[in-house]
């Protein structure tokens, strides 16, 4: 997904602030991130968020979780290219949002369907080690789990993403596990399973649970999901497809017109803008060394859900989510460099 919440400098090679110098790409925490040799399973990092600051209730995520294979190379257009870096880690819009929440200290619960293959086992291990409750994930035998292949140009940092949903059977309403919403205060959905997510959103609303839609792009069934959501977080691509306008406030108002009380548009190098009623909040991107933008928008969604569970107003939630997304960009991949609560708080205060 496109970068949300981090600003690049020329060629992303030099920064002038002490903060930026302190956040150059670090070895990943919680997922494999290696030279092009053997890939190891995720490291145990679920306990690293010592200052947990737990949010009230459980935050439930329903949607896509993938295995991401990322490679960095100096010349991606060559027939034969030796990689300068390779990483295999958890990804996917909802999987990454839940991993973010767990790292921040929230009680995160994930539901989806994976296969009993090596890819699915890797995804599950990563979620569990980060502290996500994955006990309700449905495992299907003799299938292939969702996988993404992400190529990154070493010089320009431009990405090419190839994705497959695998061969797992899409879960339906009858597959919703008992007790999925028990104790929940927030539900995050992503539009990848619209019929299932619409049913869950309807159940959540009857229970007074806030529904957040992470809308990376416009797809079938998205209109109904927007209408069932309390908060929609859309990328620039989504906003241009759903409510095209030269005036971003007009796009936000169009999004809230059909249901949500809060709408947010993430705008890459330009930060993010949110609307809550008549309150418009703009937030600049943080100044950070950018190694990779993969998953930044999903981290934004997870951090925003954390703020919602804490009942923070938009003017506090937006800078918090923006900073979390920016800090993620220090490392290769969606989940290898997820920021802790202390790191996000420091980044917000540093501004």
Image: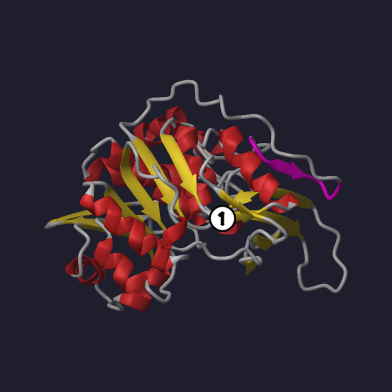
Along the line of sight, which residue is nearer the eye, 286 or 51?
51
Magenta-span inclusion, residue 31: yes
Q: Position of residue 293 (x, y in %)?
A: 55, 55
Along the line of sight, which residue is nearer the eye, 96 or 5?
96
Along the line of sight, which residue is nearer the eye, 179 or 57?
179
Q: Position of residue 332 (x, y in %)?
A: 64, 48
Magenta-span inclusion, residue 233: no
- The furthest residue to the top: 50
**Does 232 sit left or right of 347 as displayed?**
left
Along the line of sight, which residue is nearer the eye, 261 or 225?
225
Q: Position of residue 133 (x, y in %)?
A: 50, 37
Residue at 30% over, 71% down: 224
Other residues around mark 1 within 10 Å, as few (<14) / some (14–19) / many (≥20): many
Give the residue pinned by disc 1.
113
Residue at 39% over, 70% down: 238
Residue at 66% over, 29% down: 44
Q: Position of residue 227 (x, y in %)?
A: 25, 67
Give the extent of the magenta segment.
30-37
Secondary structure of residue under mark 1: strand
The image quadrant where one finds the C terminus is top left
**Does 235 sit left or right of 65 as displayed?**
left
Residue at 31% over, 78% down: 244
* Figure coloring: secondary structure
**Does 345 sit left or right of 10 as displayed?**
left
Q: Is residue 320 visible?
A: yes
């Amino acid at each position: 997904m496109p970068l949300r919440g981090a600003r690049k400098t020329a060629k992303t090679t030099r920064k002038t602030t002490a903060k930026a110098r302190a956040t150059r790409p670090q070895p990943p925490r919680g997922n494999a991130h290696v030279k092009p040799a053997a890939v190891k399973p995720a490291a145990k990092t679920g306990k690293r968020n010592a200052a947990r600051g737990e949010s009230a209730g459980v935050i439930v995520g329903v949607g896509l979780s993938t295995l991401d294979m990322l490679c960095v190379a100096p010349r991606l257009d060559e027939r034969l290219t030796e990689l300068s870096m390779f990483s295999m880690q958890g990804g996917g819009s909802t999987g990454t949002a839940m991993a973010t929440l767990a790292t921040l200290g929230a009680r995160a619960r994930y539901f989806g369907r994976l296969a009993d293959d090596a890819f699915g086992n890797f995804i599950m291990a990563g979620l569990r080690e980060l502290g996500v409750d994955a006990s309700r994930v449905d495992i299907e035998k003799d299938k292939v789990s969702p996988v993404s292949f992400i190529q990154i140009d070493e010089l320009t940092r431009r990405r090419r993403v190839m994705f497959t949903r695998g061969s797992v059977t899409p879960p339906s309403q009858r597959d919703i596990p008992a007790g999925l919403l028990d104790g929940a205060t927030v539900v995050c959905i992503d539009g990848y399973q619209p019929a299932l997510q619409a049913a869950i959103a309807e159940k959540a609303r009857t229970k007074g649970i806030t529904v957040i839609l992470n809308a990376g792009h416009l797809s079938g069934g998205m209109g109904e999901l927007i209408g069932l959501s309390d908060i929609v977080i859309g990328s620039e691509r989504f906003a241009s497809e759903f409510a095209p306008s030269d005036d971003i406030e007009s796009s936000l108002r169009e999004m809230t017109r059909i249901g949500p009380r809060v709408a947010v548009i993430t705008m890459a190098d330009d930060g993010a803008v949110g609307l809550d009623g008549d309150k418009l909040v703009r937030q600049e991107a943080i100044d950070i060394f950018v190694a990779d933008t993969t998953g930044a928008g999903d981290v934004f969604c997870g951090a925003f859900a954390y703020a919602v569970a804490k009942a923070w107003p938009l003017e506090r939630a937006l800078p918090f989510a923006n900073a979390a997304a920016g800090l993620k960009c220090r490392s290769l991949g969606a989940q290898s460099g997820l920021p802790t609560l202390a790191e996000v708080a420091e980044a917000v205060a540093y501004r």
